Image (cartoon, rainbow, N blue to C red):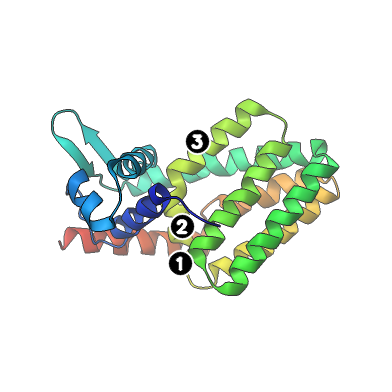
Amino acid sequence: MKRSNAQRLRDALEDDIINGRRAPGERLEPEALCRDFEVSRTPVREAIQQLVASGLVTVSPKKGTFVARVGLDQLVEMFEVMAELEGMCGRLAARRITEEELDALREALMRCEAAAKAGDTDEYYYENEGFHHAIYAASHNGFLAEEARQLKQRLKPYRRLQLQVRKRMGRSLDEHREILAAIEHGDAERAERLLRAHVVIQGERFSDFVSSVRRFGARLDAV
């Protein structure tokens, strides 16, 4: 999937923030970003807007743009809500999906499989996003789909962080296959249960996630 300059810049800044190369409170200078990434001001502005939407960056009037501090408790709460929204989308999709939408979901899964086979976590994230968006569309509930998309965008950097956990990409792909099978068979309850479990952070996955975020926070505190 070819990404725009704004997407590439946003991804690079996300990586810098999550991996501790940019500290909380650090100022982001648009001119320096233009120079460092060899892009115009437009993609820089678009990337910053997207980072603000995800909660990684804050903008203070007359002061500038700054890296925000991560709040673990709020992240966990947001993932809980995301899991419920995803589950609802899955339940409705299993009941309402059309043959054309089902074909689109199968194709999205194939693209996820190709990215996983290549071992490309960033590419897998974007194809994973397409898989989930196909389910949102198949729910045929525009309000629910929009709420899910907005919250998913806010959680984007942390969902990418999850994929860096060892073997998570492979497990995610297996879960996608099970979700597709449930939707194909019109099993609304199973689709809802699988999607909720796919997103929510619990058990060992919670421990892995907390460890990743705390390592991130420790690196930032040491800066």
Label 1 sits on residue: 164
Q: Is residue 98 left or right of residue 126?
A: right
Q: Can you see residue 28?
A: no
Label 3 sits on residue: 150
**Identity of the residue drawn at 52% across and 56% down:** 2
Q: Can you see residue 211?
A: yes
Q: Residues within 10 Å of mark 3 (few under 14, many from 20)?
A: some
User: x, y percentage for residue 3?
Assistant: 48, 53
- The amino acid pointed to by label 2 is Arg
Against 88, residue 204 (above or below) is below
Label 2 sits on residue: 160
Q: Quadrant of the C terminus?
A: bottom left
Compare marks 3 and 1 and give the one earlier in the sequence.
Answer: 3
Compare marks 3 and 2 and give the one earlier in the sequence.
Answer: 3
Element on which disc 1 rests: loop
Element on which disc 3 rests: helix
User: x, y percentage for residue 18?
Assistant: 32, 58
CB atoms of marks 3 and 2 within 8 Å: no
User: Could you say which is closer to the camera, residue 31 or residue 27?
Assistant: 31
- The amino acid pointed to by label 3 is Gln
User: Could you say which is closer to the camera, residue 11 or residue 171?
Assistant: 11
CB atoms of marks 1 and 2 within 8 Å: yes
Give how far apart the Cα atoms at labels 3 and 1 are.
23 Å
Give how far apart the Cα atoms at labels 1 and 2 are.
7 Å
